[in-house]
Image (cartoon, rainbow, N blue to C red):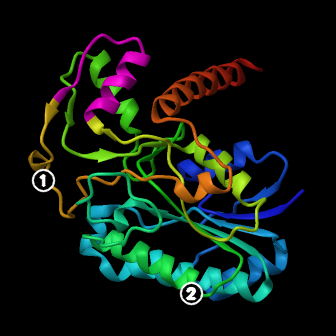
Amino acid sequence: MKRVLLVGGSGQLGAEIRKRWGDCDVVAPAHAVLDLEDDAAIARAFDERRPEVVVNAAAFHNVDRCEQEVDRAFAVNALAVERLASKCARDDVLFVTISTDYVFNGEATHPYDETDAAHPISAYGTSKLAGEFLTLRLQSRAFVVRTCGLYGVRPSQSKGHTFIDRVITQARTGEPVHVVDNVTASPTYAGHLAQTLRALIETNAYGLYHACNVGPVTWFDFAAEALRQAGIAQRPEPISSSQWKAAARRPRYSALANTALTRIGIMLPTWQEGIAAYLHDRTTDALDDARERRVP
């Protein structure tokens, strides 16, 4: 049983890691206990936990706020990641940190793989790319894993809902469902990513990876499939990304190809299977919660 120190355990991915890594002894300290910007807190966590694996699923990922709080974006997404990666390198601890499709500018016409040059167009993307570089330059036992459009059963801390939940709720209440049809991504179910990371840490093929549900898809088509799988006849209404007023620029095309993972024999399900798994797990969790509330 591996001793795992999980940073960001309350988020969508962190919740799935705690749920699915049952063969590991996972401890996920709250932010108040383990602040990545606090060297002493990191040292205490390592002394108390003596981890064999550290997973960093924490980030300052409010893309628009990063434009106004650039210093904080780099403090959390770059310098704090370097601090944690360096501690792992010194102690010979395996390190996993999560990055993003936003390191790309979105001008591609095919899914980006790990060999494509990164050109971020936002403070968020730039800070995450800096965190990647500061980790990989150590040439240590580290995995940098880029994902895209992450969603999970646990509500998003920054948005309060998942994209699929918003679409389904609007449709069921009779609201029009407006979704951009000119932005292409690789939406990824957090449960599938958690399982992939578990398989990855069993290898010694350290380095940079893309890990997403397979296949590029526009957010419009993704929403339409989510409604279909949920048994809702309503179709979304297409709009252009230019109709959304946001502080940060976002890539128009940021689908990722899992080339490096495929090379070592790790495969992820398709984005359609991601939706199906999410809807199944959301229903199962809701039923479990209901049963727990009925227990005296």
Residue at image location 39% in from the left, 59% down from the top: 101
Q: Which sits in the foreground, 267 or 43?
A: 267
Report x, y in % for residue 152: 52, 41
Q: Which residues are magenta?
A: 220-237
Furthest-right residue in view? 1
| Tag of residue 137 | 2
Does the magenta run of residues contain 92? no
Q: Quadrant of residue 45?
A: bottom right
Disc 1 secondary structure class: loop
Mark 2 surroundings: few (<14), some (14-19) or many (≥20) residues within 10 A: few
Report x, y in % for residue 247: 18, 63
Q: Which sits in the foreground, 76 or 269?
A: 269
Which residue in the structure is indicated by mark 1? 245
Which quarter of the rendering shows the C terminus? top right
Residue at image location 43% in from the left, 52% down from the top: 148
Report x, y in % for residue 55: 66, 65
Q: Indicate left or right for 249 with 281 as reference.
A: left
Q: Is residue 62 above or below residue 179?
A: below
